[in-house]
Amino acid sequence: MSHQSNTSEFHNSRDQLIRLKRSTGLKNWNTLCRWAFCLSLRDPARPSAQDIKADSNLEMTWRVFAATTPTSLLALFTLRCKRDGVPAEDPHQMATEFRLHLHRGIAMLSSVRDASGIGPLIARLLR
């Protein structure tokens, strides 16, 4: 995944990330985005298809997003896409599926009620 990925294409995602960053004290967007992505991959249901609108200037490369785990994240994502019937040879469909997982995960993290620190988010990830 060498393309730029807009991490806030659904209307609320950027605001949700801002609140999560503030409440957890995490300094980097990519950590929250990585956690959100993994949380969505763990959900057995396929994310619902939605019209994705680019309404934010918050972008990061795959390298920044994946940090020290690009191979593992790509392998997990590719396996998930295969399981869900998403053709790996279609980069547009893969990019769309990535964004759907990312934004579903951000919404899932944002739904944690007592996000007054990093503990509740970690607990949500480990459930």
Image (cartoon, rainbow, N blue to C red):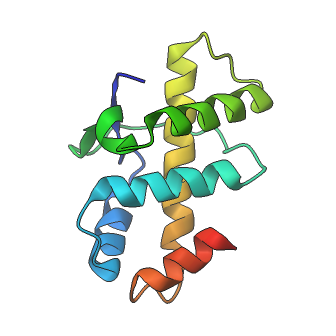
The image quadrant where one finds the C terminus is bottom right
The answer to whether residue 74 is left or right of residue 3 is right
Q: Is residue 117 visible?
A: yes
| Rendered location of residue 42, percent (x, y) | 69, 53
Which one is nearer the viewer's eye here, 9 or 33?
33
Residue at 60 percent of width and 58 percent of height: 39
Q: Residue at x 46, y 37 (%)?
A: 52
- Please tell me which residue lies in front, 111 or 61: 61
> Where residue 119 appears, x then y in whole percent?
48, 84
**Can the viewer see residue 12 in this picture?**
no
Estimate the x, y position of residue 121 in percent, counting from the top left. Answer: 50, 76
Task: Work out whether 103 lies above or below 64.
Answer: below
Query: Would you place residue 13 above or below residue 96 in this image?
Result: below
The mark tally for this picture is 0
Residue 112 image position (x, y, % from top left):
54, 79
Question: Does residue 126 appear to the left or right of 82 in the view shown?
Answer: left
User: From the viewer's perspective, is 98 left or right of 7?
Assistant: right
Farthest residue, direction top: 89
Judging depth in this view, the residue of 84 and 67 nearest the camera is 67
Name the residue located 59 percent from the left edge and 79 percent from the top edge: 123
Q: Left of 94 or right of it: where is 33?
A: left
Q: Quadrant of the N terminus?
A: top left
At x 63%, y 28%, the residue is: 78
- Quadrant location of residue 21? bottom left
